[in-house]
C-alpha cells in the first residue's frame, strides 16, 4: 500500500503560485493520486487526481513525476481563500480513503 | 442537489448517553464512510461501507456501530458516549467502492456533526 509524505506547513504570498509536494514512493502502477483540501473544519473538498499524466482543472494543476514516486499540486494564483490543509492521498488497495496529516498552507496578503 | 447531508449539525451528550448520527447521500453512490476529526488533527476512518449490505472497520472503530440502512443512508451509533468521543464527525460517499485498486472517482463529504460529550 502506498504511503505519503508531505511537509507539515507552507506559506505562500497572495497572487503567487503555491507548489505543494507529496512523496508517494511506494505507489503501485495503477493507483491514482488524489488531492483534497479542508478549509477551516469544513468537510474535505476534492481538488484533482491523476495517474501518470499531468492534469489540470479549474482549481489546480497536478504534476506527477515520470517514475510516479512524487507529485506536486500547483495553485497557480493563490488567494487568501486557498488557506487550508491539503491532503495527498493515493488509494491503498482494499483500504479506502485514509488521510494523513497533510500540509497546512497559509496564504499571506 | 444536496450531496451528502448529515444530521444533526451539533450535539451535546452526557457521558453514557447514546445517539445515532445520520448521513444520507443523493448521488446514488455505492460507498459511504464515517470519519472523526479531533481538534488540530487529521481525519481518521471509523467505518466504511463499500456497497449496500456491507460494512467494515476502519482505523478507529471501537465504541461505534454502523448501519447501512439502504443505498442512500449510513448511520453511526454511539452506544455509550465517552468524553474521548468528543470530535467532529464527517460522512462521505463515493461512486465506486474499494476492492479494486484502479479508481477514478472522487469522494464527497458532508459538512460534519460537531459532538461534545460532557
Image (cartoon, grey):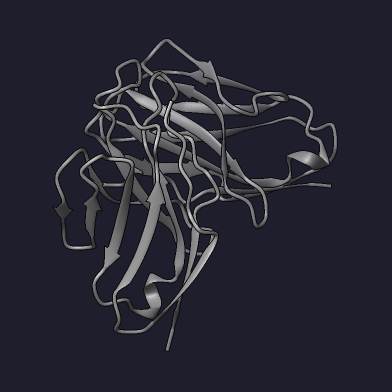
Horizontal side of residue B114 vs B79, given as left or right: left
Where B66 sits versus A58, above or below? above
- Picture quadrant where residue A89 is located: top left
Q: Position of residue B38 (x, y in %)?
A: 67, 49
Q: Position of residue B104 (x, y in %)?
A: 21, 33
Residue at x 48%, y 47% (from the top left corner): A5
Instruction: Locate the C terminus of chain A by quadrant.
Output: bottom left
Give the tally of numbered discs.
0
Where B21 sits versus A17, above or below? above
Q: Residue furthest top?
A: B53
Of residues A55 and B93, the one nearer the viewer is: A55
Q: Residue furthest bottom?
A: A109
Q: Residue furthest front?
A: A67
Residue at x 32%, y 43% (from the top left corner): A34
Of residues B19 and A10, the one nearer the viewer is: A10
Residue at x 29%, y 17% (from the top left corner): B100
Q: Position of residue A17 (x, y in %)?
A: 29, 75
Instruction: Locate the N terminus of chain A by quadrant.
Output: top left
Q: Position of residue B18 (x, y in %)?
A: 74, 30
Residue at x 65%, y 57% (from the top left corner): B40
Horizontal side of residue A68 vs B56, given as left or right: left
Horizontal side of residue A12 vs B103, given as left or right: right
Horizontal side of residue B89 vs B107, given as left or right: right
Amino acid at each position: 500500500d502506498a504511503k505519503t509524505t508531505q511537509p507539515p506547513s507552507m506559506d505562500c504570498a497572495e497572487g503567487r503560485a503555491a507548489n505543494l509536494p507529496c512523496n508517494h514512493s511506494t505507489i503501485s502502477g495503477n493507483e491514482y493520486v488524489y488531492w483534497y483540501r479542508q478549509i477551516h473544519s469544513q468537510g474535505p473538498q476534492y481538488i484533482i487526481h491523476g495517474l501518470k499524466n499531468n492534469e489540470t482543472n479549474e482549481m489546480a494543476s497536478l504534476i506527477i513525476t515520470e517514475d510516479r514516486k512524487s507529485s506536486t499540486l500547483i495553485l497557480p494564483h493563490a488567494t487568501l481563500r486557498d488557506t487550508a490543509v491539503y491532503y495527498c492521498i493515493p488509494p491503498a488497495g482494499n483500504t479506502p480513503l485514509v488521510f494523513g496529516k497533510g500540509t497546512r498552507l497559509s496564504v499571506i496578503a | 442537489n444536496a450531496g451528502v447531508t448529515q444530521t444533526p449539525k451539533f450535539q451535546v451528550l452526557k457521558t453514557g448517553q447514546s445517539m445515532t448520527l445520520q448521513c444520507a447521500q443523493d448521488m446514488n453512490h455505492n460507498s459511504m464512510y464515517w470519519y472523526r476529526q479531533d481538534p488540530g488533527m487529521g481525519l481518521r476512518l471509523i467505518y466504511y461501507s463499500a456497497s449496500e449490505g456491507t460494512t467494515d472497520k476502519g482505523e478507529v472503530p471501537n465504541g461505534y456501530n454502523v448501519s447501512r440502512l439502504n443505498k442512500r443512508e449510513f448511520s453511526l451509533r454511539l452506544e455509550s458516549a465517552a468524553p474521548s468521543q468528543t470530535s467532529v464527525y464527517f460522512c462521505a460517499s463515493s461512486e465506486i467502492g474499494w476492492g479494486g485498486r484502479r479508481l477514478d472517482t472522487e469522494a464527497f463529504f458532508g459538512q460534519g456533526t460537531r459532538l461534545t460529550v460532557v
